[in-house]
Image (cartoon, rainbow, N blue to C red):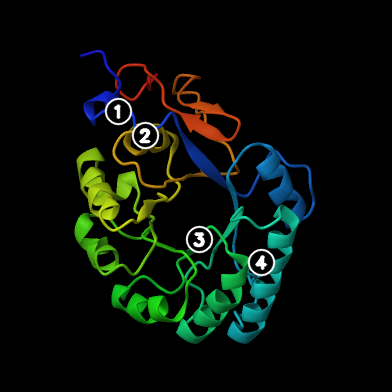
Amino acid sequence: LGVPVYELLGGATREYIECYATGFKASKATTPEGRAVDCLKAGLRVYRIGPTGDDGKPFDFYENTVKTIEFCKRIDKAVGGGGNWAIDLHTRFDPPEAIKICSALEELEPYFVEDVVRSENPGLYRQIRSLTKVPIAVGEQFGDIWDIHELVEQDLINYSRVTLPNTGGISELKKIISMCETHYVGMIPHFTGPLATAALVHILGSSSPSRCLIELAGGEPEYPAYFNENLVDFRNGKLYLNSRPGLGVQFNP
């Protein structure tokens, strides 16, 4: 038909999708605080951090609970609060420490706290949700709608991290987005490759008016040599919809 995919999905509901950075390659800063500030100056919406303890030593729950809370306070101060940062706990903590961290972060108001506990037991989030008010993001380990429906339909999370390649295609992710919309659950898909990033712009730009973000590793899209140079339209920290046919992607074998 010669039309962009977002037109086939119902038409655009937004001009662009805000992005957040996991790390920020463009920064020359030597501290996480400096990289976070540079990330926001570049126009990205959120700078995401992880917990302390990735130093190769045995993971001490108590020590890293305290250090992670202090780390979050430093980042929050650097970016001026306002939900300009988020943290992925990387499923490193068990419920007692995870809840302690989330409770301490409530007054800091992060954009989201991701993977508070391990993903094998979604029902555990009933306990987590009842004990903390921070926005919770879960789902990068999940695939189809059955993996995440319990968390969404019981209002246990605020953001879905389910992403396009894991679901198997646009149609399945559309179903998940529609389900999430009825429960006010936003979409923050897990970082994927460059083709999926281009596709997510079409899906998130047309499927729902719900809040959404796209994750960019290093704070910028990938531009492999085997795709066209204008694979995506990335400007001022945002991914804009493009009107080229299909996904707007051309592959050079």
Q: Earlier in the sequence, mark 3 or mark 1?
A: 1
In this picture, residue 12 sits left or right of residue 8: right
**Is the residue 250 above or below the residue 62 in the image?**
above
| Residue 205 numbered tag | 2
Q: Position of residue 185 (x, y in %)?
A: 34, 56
Of the pair 19 and 223, the residue shown nearer to us: 19
Dot 2 amino acid type:
Gly
User: Is label 4 in a helix, a strand or a loop?
Assistant: helix
Circle 4 residue = 72
Q: Earlier in the sequence, mark 3 or mark 4?
A: 4
Q: Which quadrant of the view contains residue 201?
A: top left
Task: For the residues labelled 3 and 4, say whether their Cβ atoms are less than 8 Å apart.
Answer: no
Q: Which quadrant of the view contains residue 107?
A: bottom right
Of the pair 175 and 133, the residue shown nearer to us: 133
Q: CA distance from mark 4 to mark 1?
A: 37 Å
Q: Residue at x 31, y 67 (%)?
A: 155
Which quadrant would the N terminus be assigned to in this image?
Answer: top left
Q: Position of residue 187 (x, y in %)?
A: 38, 50
Circle 1 residue = 6
Number of callouts: 4
Q: Earlier in the sequence, mark 3 or mark 2?
A: 3
Q: CA distance from mark 3 to mark 2?
A: 21 Å
Q: CA distance from mark 2 to mark 4?
A: 31 Å
Q: Residue at x 46, y 71 (%)?
A: 116
Task: For the residues labelled 2 and 4, say whether their Cβ atoms are less than 8 Å apart.
Answer: no
Which quadrant would the C terminus be assigned to in this image?
Answer: top left
**Is the residue 138 above or below the residue 210 in the image?**
below
Task: For the residues labelled 4 and 1, say whether their Cβ atoms are less than 8 Å apart.
Answer: no
| Residue 112 numbered tag | 3
User: Is label 2 in a helix, a strand or a loop?
Assistant: loop
Q: Is residue 149 visible?
A: yes
